[in-house]
Amino acid sequence: MAKTALVLGGGGLVGMAYHAGALKALHDARLRPAGADVIVGTSAGAIIASYLAAGWEGDDFYEYAHGRHRDVHKDPDDQQEVVRQLFAPLWETPVQRAQRSIGSLFAIASSRGFWRGGRRGQVPHGALRRAFPSGLYSTERTRQRLNEDLPREWPRENLFICAADLYSGEPAPFGKEGAPKAPLPDAVLASTAIPGLFPPVKIGDRHYVDGGIVSATSLSLAVEEGCDVILCVAPLGYRGEGGLLAADPRIWPAMVSRQLFARTLRREVREAREKGCEVLVIRPWLEELAALGVNAMRHFDRSAITDAACGGARRVLDDHRHHPVIEAFKRSDKKEKTG
């Protein structure tokens, strides 16, 4: 029997809204992606993957995005307070902001291998790092919410939460054999620590940041785990079909901002298929890009983004209704129900 994988990519708050729509479409198609043998989550996808593994269903995310979920604060002012706390600044004075801005540039350079001639692992001296701490916004509210919602023990095997080592730039797939040990909430927080925006997360004696600096989806990890049927949701990719739509200037900025991610995704999908894997990717159609926009950390229109993603994902599923990946996930659904 085929070994299935669900791969959930990054994309900030917009990416989380996109996942909510895609998972709603899968749920309505009577597919249960949580029944995959392997679940891989990166950045925003790490949050979605962890909640799926902890028991959320596909339509729970959709209801949450629309403010109707049982875990959503009923008072709109409370919801706005949650968002304000998500971007609570770590500075109090202009000097502190400048210091953190410089430190954040160091973190970005280190994670991308640009420090000292591009050699990863070379970071500023400890005293310099203390003088210029990285991260502009606090993650304490996010840490608190993750600890409230998620178990510290991993709820299932073969759940991989992908971060990256700040100092080496190497991937850190938490949950994988041989990877660093971490409570699930800490691993998720590390996977979402966007370099420059949020502080790195210390686990053991190492510091970790958003796994998206290595790959926005970490699809290759599913291949390494021997999965031959892969369903990938990639908010930062886009479908190139419908050529004339690319002439619409409203979507140019979103296309440009996604070029690197889309190119990496195409390479990973091609390499997986060359190894005999069946891969189906749910990613935005060109006409969806106008709704998704460039700012991945928007929050005020998440319901509109979720609805657009749901419609686009339904279109993908309809176009590929007999795809081997769809058939395999129908079997994984039956396996989960009868297991």
Image (cartoon, helix red, strand yellow):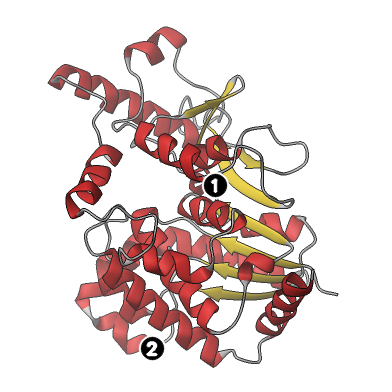
Dot 1, how many residues are within 10 Å of its Cα: few (below 14), some (14-19), or many (20+)?
many
248 lies above or below 178? below
Task: Tally the marks.
Answer: 2
- Which of the 4 image quarters holds residue 244? bottom left
- Which SS class for mark 1? loop
Residue 76 in the image, given as x and y percentages of width and height: 19, 54
Q: List the residue tagged with mark 2.
A: 242
200 lies above or below 96? below
Residue 339 lies left or right of residue 58; in this view the side is right
Residue 113 visible, this angle: no
Residue 330 in the image, given as x and y percentages of width and height: 69, 81
182 lies above or below 271? above
Q: Quadrant of the C terminus?
A: bottom right
The residue at 56%/74% (across/down) is 281
Q: Are marks 1 and 2 in contact (CB under 8 Å)?
A: no
Q: Quadrant of the N terminus?
A: bottom right
Residue 7 in the image, given as x and y percentages of width and height: 60, 62
Residue 89 lies left or right of residue 228; in this view the side is left
- Which of the 4 image quarters holds residue 238? bottom left
Residue 246 lies left or right of residue 313; in this view the side is left
Q: List the residue tagged with mark 1.
A: 214
- Which of the 4 image quarters holds residue 279? bottom right
Q: Who comes first in sequence, dot 1 or dot 2?
A: 1
Q: Which one is in front, 181 or 75? A: 75
The residue at 52%/30% (across/down) is 166
What amino acid is at disc 1? Answer: Val
